[in-house]
Image: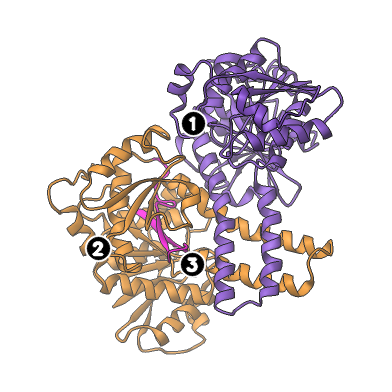
Chain colours: A purple, B orange
Amino acid sequence: VRIAVDAMGGDQGPQVVVEGALQAVGRGPSGLELILVGREEEIRRALGGAEVPSVRVVHASEVIGMSEAPAAAVRKKKDSSIAVGTRLVKQGQADGFVSAGNTGAVVASSLVNMGRLAGVSRPAIATLWPSTTGGAVVLDVGANYECVPKNLVQFAVMGTVYARYHLGVERPRVGLLNIGEERSKGNDLVRESYSLLEAESAINFVGNVEGRDVFNGAADVVVCDGFVGNVILKFSESIFSFLSHMVRDEIRRGVVAKAGALLMRGAFSNVRAQLDYAEYGGAPLLGVNGVTIISHGKSSERAIKNAILAAARTVTEQVNGHIEASFKGPVGHVAEVS
Amino acid sequence: VRIAVDAMGGDQGPQVVVEGALQAVGRGPSGLELILVGREEEIRRALGGAEVPSVRVVHASEVIGMSEAPAAAVRKKKDSSIAVGTRLVKQGQADGFVSAGNTGAVVASSLVNMGRLAGVSRPAIATLWPSTTGGAVVLDVGANYECVPKNLVQFAVMGTVYARYHLGVERPRVGLLNIGEERSKGNDLVRESYSLLEAESAINFVGNVEGRDVFNGAADVVVCDGFVGNVILKFSESIFSFLSHMVRDEIRRGVVAKAGALLMRGAFSNVRAQLDYAEYGGAPLLGVNGVTIISHGKSSERAIKNAILAAARTVTEQVNGHIEASFKGPVGHVAEVS
């Protein structure tokens, strides 16, 4: 399995990415080969002269910044590490691509260079959340800010395949994120999606779920548009910072003994790590004709390592083949490419 | 100040509401009069024969259930406690209305019976969230699941007035809830709203804020459509249940000593109470021509008491008058009724 890694991605520069890659090589499956993509000189410096047989470097002269407008950046910077990395997949020189860089640019470049799987009109970013029943796949969390009902149905099908492989649930329960349980609830998008989801035979639709259900195991797959998904993803990140702040406050006010507070902070950081999609091994962009794993800009070495291993697993488990097979399934499938 | 209270509202029946009302009378401002609305016999039973001079009962024969479809229920049940309570405000027999009942029905009935303030096309439910800088007003959290840009501008103006009175900030900073800071980010609704918010002179617009900014004090007023707002409101409720679950889990696994866990749970419930809009005294439905305070279905006696006191304060502070004045302000106001 050959994984291209965006060495320039992430807030902390090549050093962290390169270290993560070296850890992955050390602990990954046998036969794992990595291609570090980016400014060769900087990558060589980060490698510190180390020559690892299963790691090679492919030069890319440009870098897309974290806050650049994705579409324009992808159009202009044809030799960015993101463009080169996704092209390596297109050309069959790599089986997957991992980047902690500009999410929008990774999505756009993956679409341009890899294309879409048969049956998919819009790829989606899927994240694995902890829940009281072991975990839930939530998608889309940021690839599509404007969705039509058909998109949500396709997300449900892709999320079902992903949950089957990553949660080990044979018939994952799919919930539609809404503001109430009744089918009449919500905005136009979710009300129209409800009927389509009911009619889709490739999934096990259990109806609407609410914000409070993400963590309580009411569904194995939670489907939403990328705007709502991204808001709750970032919202969840903030809650733990806020809790830490509260705890500091309680210490200052003498409400809680320091020992108890330290225990609390330990528990918070456990939960926070579980919530952090980088720690989870990155978020797959499902629906592109290739494997793309998106890591958090703040990724640690460990997060990069996990993302690379997740990419390798997604390749060997043939997740894409299973997604295409789902769309080609028996009569009843309403999803189609527009 | 005369406040009508929906005695039939909430998951726990009249007893809790009546107890909360009696607490409010005991601790409220002098001159506070309460009108308990609902099935007289049940209310009298809950009162246990107590005769309180400043509390009277107005009979309403019907009850709208928590899961009834709001529009149909309001149309059919003309003698529900919600309909009668909002009519008391319309008729000038009460200055405000408090209900822990069916939120959609309270919104619809308030609109029908009280009408809207000049300048407001859509009322919004505002909630006060804790933040590292003291608090943030988030609106809309559930009155409107389908919004146009103009609605969000009006929410911003109303939220500004509310924040001024409830957070004591003279020029509250208004943020637009989005998935990135740049003005080009997001879906059509937020991108179009951005320009309108910039042009609105009645507010102090500071640009986009993300999900993570709700708690970190980046804005005093956070504006969003009611679908997104409701999802994050319910999502935040679930996080603390999930944390409790995690803590139980850690105890079972022996990771954390029981003493530490108990301290943690204490801190969680503090934070949870701060997040619970019922504990905060209920959420005002801003923009109707009257004062309506919506309490959580799970409201405790204390929450009901706080909601009644919040309603009284909203009346005496003339929040509605200040909202109307904002909409009648200097040139530059883009908000208008459709």
Q: Quadrant of the C terminus of chain B?
A: top left
Task: Name the residue that disc number 3 marks.
Answer: B278
Query: Magenta span has B136?
Result: yes
Residue B257: percent from left, percent from top = 79, 71
- Closer to the camera, B256 or A13? A13
- Give the magenta range: B124-146
Classify A156 as above or below B232. Answer: above
Name the chain under label 1: A
Foreground: disc 1 or disc 2: 1
Residue located at (15% from left, 54% from top): B329
- Closer to the camera, B253 or A155? B253
> Are labels 3 and 2 assigned to the same chain?
yes
Query: Magenta span has B171?
Result: no
Q: Is mark 2 on a helix, strand or loop?
A: helix
Q: Residues within 10 Å of mark 2 (few under 14, many from 20)?
A: many
Task: Name the residue that disc number 2 marks.
Answer: B320
- Closer to the camera, A228 or B61? A228
Residue located at (71% from left, 17% from top): A94
Classify B95 as above or below A155. Answer: below
- Residue type at mark 1 is Gly
- Residue type at mark 3 is Ala
Residue B285: percent from left, percent from top = 36, 59
Residue A178: percent from left, percent from top = 54, 43
> Are labels 1 and 2 assigned to the same chain?
no
Task: Name the residue that disc number 1 marks.
Answer: A65
Residue located at (48% from left, 68% from top): B8
Q: Quadrant of the N terminus of chain B?
A: bottom left
